[in-house]
Amino acid sequence: MSLEADVGDLWNRYQDGLTAADATDADAKVIDEFLAALEAGEVRAAEKTGDDVTSWEANEWVKRGILLNFGLRETEAREYGGVTYYDVLPLRDTEDLGERGTRNTPDGTAIRRGAYLGSDCIMMSPSFVNMGAYVGDGTLVDSCDTVGSCAQLGENVKLGANTLIGGVLEPVEDAPVIVEDGVSLGAGCRVTSGFRVGENSIVGENTLLTPRIPVYDLVEEEVIYGHLPADRRAFTRMVESSVGDHELFEGGAYKPAVVATHVEEDTLEATQREDALRE
């Protein structure tokens, strides 16, 4: 049987009442092999099926495999940096990262089992990459960044300091966050709830990207939800709220929105100059 079929069979048994106490060594082997496949980049939580950023589709069986690793494991005492902590999973073995030229600075970079990091990545401390996440070649995860469960980051992505990439398990979402190749997210950005950022886009600091906030795309002159097209420069602006005429709001009420324009040449040049820091 294939790994997908093994995970599917185990999932059905789990749905029928299989518990961590009842799981066999063979069951443990399946979920261990699943984690190894994630860490090797052989399976991913989502795949791009077309040319557009909206064409990403979640691999449901992969999310089930991740949930099995929580449902069929016991919480155990573990050691990290001389500190005892309790979790169902250990942190990821990082011996393979050095072979690929990937760096993770000490005292605070944590990579959970089941996460993939490509070649020539940089993780600054403190930062955290959760289970099922995929971090493409040459991507920078800066200080105080979190890459949530199953999030898919492309190649040469730059996450500014204190950036949050949401996961599918906290809370449970249908699809993971997608950040395509060449994207630059400014410090303090938040990308949540399965939002998709198109390649080579540049997002201003402290911008919140979530399906509930409209994106005013001035390039195509349309309002869209749930994704930012490729090759955009995006930033937050306040727009008038539907409750603006309420008597409790003197002077009107406003809500956040995202404005997207063409990526300007000087903005691209400024972003490219940062590459010197990563040679």
Image (cartoon, rainbow, N blue to C red):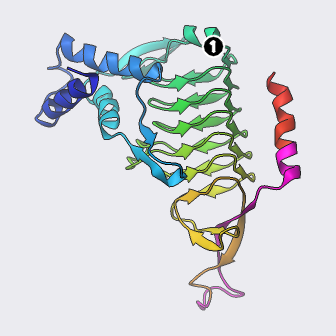
Position above or below: 158 against 193? above
- Residue carrying label 1: 100
Region of the chain picked out in magenta, as a range: 245-269
- Residue found at the very far left of the displayed protein: 16
| Label 1 packing within 10 angstroms: few (<14), some (14-19), many (20+) | some
**Residue 230 lies in the magenta stretch:** no
Q: Quadrant of the C terminus?
A: top right
Task: Name the amino acid, label 1.
Answer: Arg
Q: Which of the 4 image quarters holds residue 217? A: bottom right
Residue 183 can be seen, yes or no: yes
Residue depicted at x 68% and y 16%: 106
Q: Quadrant of the N terminus?
A: top left
- Label tally: 1
Residue depicted at x 46% and y 51%: 55
Q: In the depicted view, which residue is nearer to us: 22 or 60?
A: 60
- Residue found at the very far front of the displayed protein: 51
Left or right, 184 with respect to 7, comes to: right
Q: Position of residue 181 (x, y in %)?
A: 63, 39
Q: Position of residue 233 (x, y in %)?
A: 74, 56
Q: In the depicted view, which residue is nearer to us: 76 or 51?
A: 51
Residue 113 can be seen, yes or no: no
Q: Which of the 4 image quarters holds residue 68? A: top left
Left or right, 256 with respect to 147, comes to: right
Q: Position of residue 109 (x, y in %)?
A: 62, 23
